[in-house]
Amino acid sequence: ALARELNLPIVLHQREALHELLAILEDADPPHRGVMHCFTGDPADATRFLELGLHLGIGGIVTYRSAPDLRRAVQMLPADRMLLETDAPYLAPVPYRGRRNEPAFLRATVATIAELRRQTEDEVARATTRNAVALFRIPLSIE
């Protein structure tokens, strides 16, 4: 309610409470403006968050072969609702898994997303940058 009153985006982080969070959001006068940080759900979860008006933050976990549900969700996401995240210092992407994560490793996440979506890395980078600029109202011109 405060974010809506101040016209600010919300940033949501949940851990082992996905369905509880969805229930709260569905009861809290959607649509919402914001991002589901470090999204790790499946296509059905992605659809529910998208229907609530949220963007989905995609980080290094998408590079893990052990995350097939997330990888399928990324393939179906609308290009205008996806953001990139590092979640530094955690969740470094392959081939840096196990190391302290840092923003420079985001290129590996972009490469995986581009491969999954059959896009170029530049297309993914431009779209997600545009999305971040628009959502957070960053005073930056993006072509």
Image: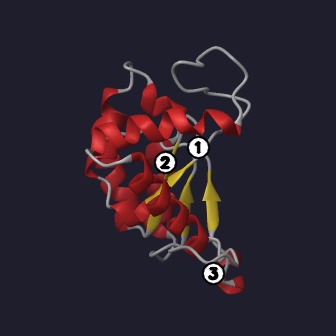
Residue 82: percent from left, percent from top? 44, 57
Which of 29/143 is in front?
143
Circle number at residue 4:
3
Which of 30/100 is in front?
100
Q: Nearer the viewer, mark 2 or mark 3?
A: 3
Q: SS for tag 3?
A: helix
Q: Which residue is mark 2?
A: 20
Q: How many marks?
A: 3
The residue that appears at 32% across and 54% down in the rendered structure is: 77
Q: Identify the mark nearer the N-term, 3 or 1.
A: 3
Circle number at residue 14:
1
Tell me the quarter of the picture where residue 48 sits: bottom left
> In what quadrant of the picture does the N terminus appear?
bottom right
Determine the CA span between mark 1 and mark 2: 9 Å
Residue 43: percent from left, percent from top? 28, 45
Label 1 Cα crowd, 10 Å radius (few <14 / some 14-19 / many 20+): few
Label 3 Cα crowd, 10 Å radius (few <14 / some 14-19 / many 20+): few
- Regarding residue 67, the answer to whether it shows in the image is yes
Q: Amino acid at mark 2?
A: Glu
